[in-house]
Amino acid sequence: MLNRGYYQGFGGAFLPEILYATFDELEETFRAAKNDPDFWRNYEQLMSSYSCRPTPLTFAENLTRHFGGARIYIKREDLNHTGAHKANNVMGQGLLVKRMGKNRVIAETGAGQHGVATATMAAKFGFDCTIYMGEVDVERQRPNVFWMERLGAKVVPVLDGTRILKDAINEAFRDWVSNMDTTHYVLGTACGPHPFPEMVSWFQSIIGTEARRQILAVEGKLPARIYACVGGGSNAMGIFSGFFDDPVELVGVEAGGQGLDSGKHASRLCSKDASVGVAQGYKTYFLQNFEGQMKETHSIAAGLDYIGVSPILAYHKETGRVRFEAATDDEVVAATALTIRKEGVIPALESAHAFVQAFKEAPALSPEDIVIVNQSGRGDKDIFTVADAFNDPEWQKFIIKKAKAYNA
């Protein structure tokens, strides 16, 4: 399947010549680490002592009773240090940065979780850190911006284009070209030029390895289905990796925004608005027009409004190994509210997309069946967006009071 980063025609490394040597160095370092059993053992030890691994697999008893179908389990990546699956990838890449002897890291971020995770890793390992973030995302994810800055990172609002995730990625690449001797780009998802899709998926595979072991220990059998949200695709690749060789249905859930016919969504793999193209160093499905110009995206979840998707997931769409669906903003808000009330668990808006599809399908399954929802992050970061969506009057009073105090 893999030929220097190609997955049946998806992927590759479409690079400016100036970056060839940097990518060769990265791939050589990655290959050496992947072939070194001590590296993975050290990685697991780091994640165990620093980041709460293994994360729990929680039986959602109340949701299971509420829907009356399959037994619902939640893989709790929200309990990872920094509040999301992002720590798995950045800590792994941090170990690679140490091997390469570099002293500065840069990253892009949309929802802010990858930015916080990268800033945390930089603080722990003693690296300088710069985070690029679209101006729109800076505003809607202000709590994460605050923590990135407290951790010592420089947060650069990106004013170009649509001022969201794709624009932050472009700006991070520009930085890397100018500073590649000292700097490593900690790409946050399973996209971009080879070896990033494979490398990020490898670090995130710790999710699926744990989940498979955990469900067999508690239930004695494999799940019928696994659900994960899909932006770039790293959390989905992470949990799916543990089950690719098993007779388990894998379901990726994209951002349906205001509906797939509205033009205001971020669905690449189950909408008519996407087509195969090359951008940002790799080949996959992109939301683009007939001239190859990227379209604007929309999602209530800042981490899902990316124009592209992992080439590995694009490959699995073509083979039919992974089924893709889309959840609308309204469905996501409803699923978030239900999960909070029924289980006392607060999913990130990104993760809530996976809950939407699980809630739709679990009632039609047998009580003997098991489904796992990958809760890729926690909802603290979404407090402003969720409170607005719930139209909470007390929250509105709080914001007005704070604004008056600042302006006094």
Image (cartoon, rainbow, N blue to C red):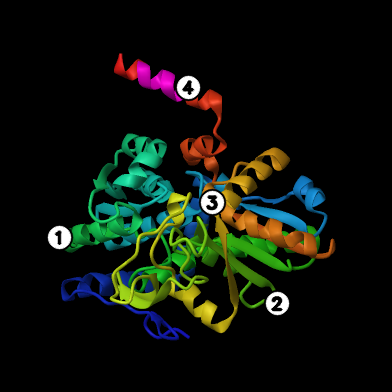
Q: Are marks 4 and 2 in contact (CB under 8 Å)?
A: no
Task: Write down the region rendered in magenta.
Answer: 397-404
Q: Are marks 3 and 1 in contact (CB under 8 Å)?
A: no
Amino acid type for the residue under numbered disc 3: Asp
Question: Which residue carries the number 1 mark?
Answer: 178
Question: Which residue carries the number 3 mark?
Answer: 329
Amino acid type for the residue under numbered disc 1: Ser
Q: Which residue in the rendered view is the most extreme toward the top?
A: 408
Queried whether the magenta region covers residue 56, the answer comes back as no
Question: Which residue carries the number 2 mark?
Answer: 247
Q: Secondary structure at mark 3?
A: helix
Question: Which residue carries the number 4 mark?
Answer: 398
Vertical placement of 210 versus 249: above or below? Answer: above
Q: Are marks 4 and 3 in contact (CB under 8 Å)?
A: no
Mark 4 vs mark 2: give the one in front: 4
Q: Secondary structure at mark 1?
A: helix
Is 407 situated left or right of 349 in this image?
Answer: left
